Amino acid sequence: MNRTRTAWAILAGAATLSALSACAPAEPTEARGPQAIVGWSNGGDELIVYVGTCHGDPDATVVEDDETVTVTVESTLHDPGDSCQDSLRVALDTQLGDRTVIDGVTGETPPGIEG
């Protein structure tokens, strides 16, 4: 009987440790840093830019030349369970015109959003 009771105590302890370690996050649930643009729209002398963060206080830097407008957004990525996006207005020195918008994080052209 004593061996059985000891075995059950060991199993219960192992199960408790396993359950507790599963509850602890492996990585922080928030991280501030560069975030890829998930969409944008042309507002003439400004861009409306969307990123996949939720209430992440996004901030953008813009580099403009004759052919491109490169936008790099930094924001706080909260727990991936959040299902909203942040948007921000990015002022341009001149109208966007025919220039290409580039995501400074990915180096690619992000998808445009009509409307």
Image (spheres, rainbow, N blue to C red):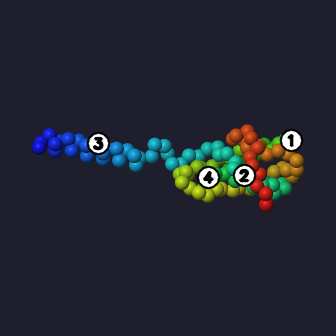
The residue type indicated by label 4 comes to Thr
Pick whichever of labels 1 and 3 is earlier in the sequence: 3
CA–CA distance in space, label 1 to label 3: 62 Å
Task: Judge whether 3 appears above or below 97 on screen.
Answer: above
Q: Quadrant of the N terminus?
A: top left
Which residue is identified by label 3?
14
- Mark 3: few, some, or many residues within 10 Å (few <14, many ≥20)? few
Along the line of sight, the residue nearer the viewer: 27 or 88: 27
Which residue is identified by label 1?
67
List the single residue furthest toward the bottom: 115
Asked if the residue at tag 3 contacts the one at tag 1, i.e. Cβ–Cβ closer than 8 Å, the answer is: no
The local secondary structure at tag 4 comes to loop
Which is closer to the viewer, label 3 or label 2?
3
Which residue is identified by label 4?
53
Which residue is identified by label 2?
39
Pick whichever of labels 2 and 1 is earlier in the sequence: 2
Query: In the figure, is residue 58 to the left or right of 22?
Result: right
